[in-house]
Image (tube, coloured by chain):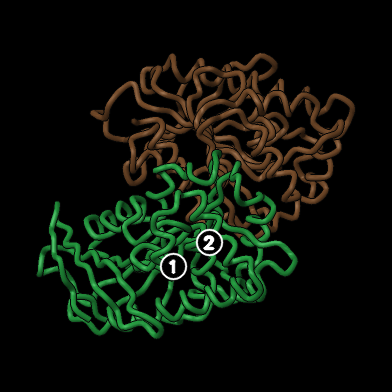
Chain colours: A green, B brown
Amino acid sequence: MELTTETTERGVTERDFVVDGPREPVPGVLWTPAAAATAWPRPLVLMGHGGSQHKRAPNVVALARRLVRHHGIAAAAIDLPLHGDRTPPDERDLALPDRQRRLRERMAAEGGHVAAAHHAVDDWTATLDALQAHRDVGTGPVGYWGVSMGTRFGVPLVAGETRITAAVLGLFGWAPGPHLPGFDELARQVAVPLLFVIQWDDELVRREWALALYDLFGASTKLLHGNPGGHLAMPRAEYRASEAFLAHFLMK
Amino acid sequence: MELTTETTERGVTERDFVVDGPREPVPGVLWTPAAAATAWPRPLVLMGHGGSQHKRAPNVVALARRLVRHHGIAAAAIDLPLHGDRTPPDERDLALPDRQRRLRERMAAEGGHVAAAHHAVDDWTATLDALQAHRDVGTGPVGYWGVSMGTRFGVPLVAGETRITAAVLGLFGWAPGPHLPGFDELARQVAVPLLFVIQWDDELVRREWALALYDLFGASTKLLHGNPGGHLAMPRAEYRASEAFLAHFLMK
């Protein structure tokens, strides 16, 4: 794995990378402290972006930079399958609502969710392997942060990836039925310290679905944080809580 | 109001007081920074203890001392009606389950909840008047902290006491019916920044009742924090969150 296109701003070095994924190359971004003398191996947070977003979604970049600046924690994001630089060529010029409809249709198709989850987890596994093998990251504690689609794929990732020891999830739900096959069992396997975030007036995720998912998680340390507002209105204070939670459990 | 029985430990001065309440004397405790030079007027947090507890319940004392030591915020607790030093003489020697049954019966009697809430709010008003008139407190920002019975009486207090500008409530719920007359309307009037805490497996407060109460609050800044466990298992980290929330909103 090569780290390229280096820029440094306010103590945070940002570098692009491409991981040799199991199906296709996986483009990503790594944020690390600019000062060479900081502790190593350092904690690392994997950040899963939301649906129709990409590895440099503003909320991902902002939280990644804070983890680096305030705690010396490295952060990495990848373009998840079909997103960002991996968007299919014939969908690149679609208006956002049409693009979101195409993504939803794929997920709702027979086996669509399970296949997508496998692809995403495989990409994350290859990415984590590559990052931990790199001299600027190493094999320190690993956390995961991802809401909405970042939780859709974060639950199977955190359930199976034993290197991850703390996670922030949210803006996603579960209900009995065929929509998310096996998802409830995976949620039960999430046993690391967990912060789960809901938006009380989420227009995409029904409140009882979100609470049902929180209920499923197998973690003994699991915090529920709720705030008023819709799917995209997660307040800045809640990102601060994510930062404090990950710093606490990765650096203690 | 006289402040008596002064003790100082690790930078926190603790003094007893008795307020001339509207029905009977109200005994309380005030915690302030020992260093005379700290800022004045200082923020003050009123702390409402739980059912069958008293003004020096261990969770109240611990949080009060942290507010003083870490933030220079004063804290005060009183024995609520029928509790602590105000326990009726013929109930002083009752075993805890019998005592709790007596308290529940009073609250469940016709008009019992409304009368108790009025008494508690009147006592708090007299206490706040007296504390703000004292040279060691003054008229700084005021917060409220109280869970369980501390929320039963905290909701009417915070709804009507305009001097209170931030509150932590929780471990209490609401459901349609005659149990808590007028309580829903009072909850809608709680409009200050609010942190509401639930215990996910609370054996005394059904989850849907707690969530219904959270839903009622009129505050635009209202955080929901949940944790696994029963009514008495609120984790230490949640007290830390109470401390940070009150410090943020009283000192900004």
Residue B221 screen position, x and y as percent: 50, 34
Residue A211 can be seen in this image: yes
Which is nearer the N-term, disc 1 or disc 2?
1
For badge 2, the amino acid type reads Leu
Q: How many marks?
A: 2
Q: Are marks 1 and 2 in contact (CB under 8 Å)?
A: yes
Residue A221 screen position, x and y as percent: 53, 65
Residue B65 can be seen in this image: no
* Circle 2 crowding by C-alpha within 10 Å: few under 14, some 14–19, many from 20: some
Question: On the same chain: label 1 and label 2?
Answer: yes
Question: Between residues B143 and A235, which one lies in front from this camera angle?
Answer: A235
Query: Residue at the location (52% across, 73% down)?
Result: A116
Residue A220 screen position, x and y as percent: 57, 68
For badge 1, the amino acid type reads Leu
From the viewer's perspective, tell me whether residue A228 is left or right of residue B203: left
Q: CA distance from mark 1 to mark 2?
A: 8 Å
Query: Residue at the location (55% across, 39% down)?
Result: A228
Identify the residue at the far right of this view. Answer: B110
Residue wearing tag 2:
A103
From the viewer's perspective, tell me whether residue B179 is left or right of residue A124: right
Which numbered tag is attached to residue A128? none
Secondary structure category for the residue under label 1: loop
Q: Quadrant of residue B26?
A: top right
Which numbered tag is attached to residue A82? 1
Chain letter for mark 1, please.
A
- Quadrant for the C terminus of chain B in the image: top left
Chain letter for mark 2, please.
A
Question: Between residues B61 and A49, which one lies in front from this camera angle?
Answer: A49
Q: Quadrant of residue A12?
A: bottom left
**In this view, A9 is above or below A45:** above
Residue A10 screen position, x and y as percent: 14, 52
Query: Residue at the location (59% across, 71% down)?
Result: A113
